[in-house]
Image (tube, rainbow, N blue to C red):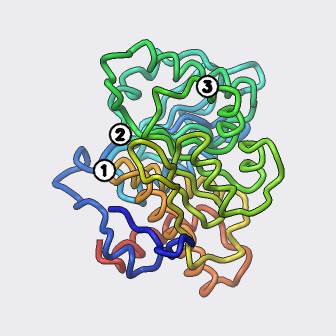
Amino acid sequence: MSIRSDSGSPTLVTPSLLRGWPLPAPGEDKYSRGSVLVIGGARATPGAALLAGAAALRAGAGKLTLAVAESVAVHVGVALPECGAMGLPETSSGSVTGEGLDLISSYLDSADAILVGPGLDDPDLTEDLLRALLGREAAAGEKNDGGGPAVVLDAFALGALVNVADRCDPWKGRLILTPNPKEAEILLGRDLKDLPADVAEIADRYQAVVSCQGLIARPSGPDAPEESELWKITTGYGGLGTSGSGDVLAGATAGLRARGTTGPQAACWGTHLHAAAADRLASRLGPLGFLARELADELPALMLELNT
């Protein structure tokens, strides 16, 4: 579904618009709702991967695997028993390296959405990881035939993307980015000037769907409209500026994408639900002080209210 404002201004994402852009039916079992693989969770920051994974399940994904630093994999699996937890090679300080993708090869092959970034804490090693993932896909070549799982990048994976942008053809048409304003500046290599135009520029530069500060852009290109499409969220509270909030957004978006949505639909729905959850918590608890993990708990009821 393509929804575009005639005036060229962003299309407002309202409950009415989302009801006319419904999510896929739940299906009969967990396999029909898609599988999410989250790669992140250094020893010092496993909670980010947990937040993202929980949000993916709350958004309706059927299966979840968290690939995290080996030293915390068991702890993560106990903290979120609904997930599968896989240990990845790490440095002596607990940072996930770019090695060991063979350990999660079957999960990479079977995932419907792969989220990279939550809880990764070393920019150089994150770049190594992206290069390894891209190299693996490039080696698959003809077997992929342009398909494959959606790829969502967040946190340090966004900074690493800048240095591997010339190698991203394997991810063309299935890449989603969820930067905050500082990360958007890194992606652009300059300060932000006009957020709607800047978000559209990121979308075109990386040929990705982008969600940043309540603005969602779809890139122009041969398989898209001649100009970038832009949407704007109409809800949301300042309390979203809290630790872990971005992990929830990225996880919810990955979960929705795994269910069979398009990239723009997953980003619009995920960003709206994230913001609406903040509104709901602010009305109960106050404008500040609610926790990122509480955002994910609001998602199922919000989807129900939107008749999905």
Badge 1 element = loop
Q: Is residue 165 visible?
A: yes
Is residue 242 shown left or right of residue 7? right
Residue at coordinates 31% horizontally, 45% vertically from top-left? 34
Identify whether 238 is placed above or below 25.
Answer: below
N-term mark: 2 or 3: 2
Across and down, in percent, residue 289 comes to: 73, 74
Mark closer to the observer (3, 1): 3
Q: Position of residue 90 (x, y in %)?
A: 66, 21
Q: Are marks 2 and 3 in contact (CB under 8 Å)?
A: no
Image quadrant containing the C terminus = bottom left
How many numbered marks appear?
3
Q: CA–CA distance between discs 2 and 3?
A: 24 Å
**Of 282 and 190, the residue lying toward us:** 190
Amino acid at pointer 1: Gly
Q: Residue at x 48, y 54 (%)?
A: 253
Q: Position of residue 43 (x, y in %)?
A: 69, 33
Three-letter amino acid code at disc 3? Asp
Drawn side of residue 147 relative to residue 167, left or right = left
Tell me, for residue 260, which label it has, or none: 1
Identify the element where label 3 is drawn.
helix
The residue located at (64%, 82%) in the rendering is 282
The residue singled out by tag 2 in the image is: 112
Instruction: Give the structural element (helix, strand or loop) at label 2.
Output: loop
- Residue at the (64%, 50%) spot, across then down: 201
Circle 1: is it few (<14), some (14-19), or many (20+) Cα within 10 Å?
many
Q: Which residue is mark 3?
A: 166
Identify which amino acid the numbered label 2 is placed on: Asp
Are the residues at dot 2 and dot 1 in contact (C-beta closer than 8 Å)?
Answer: yes
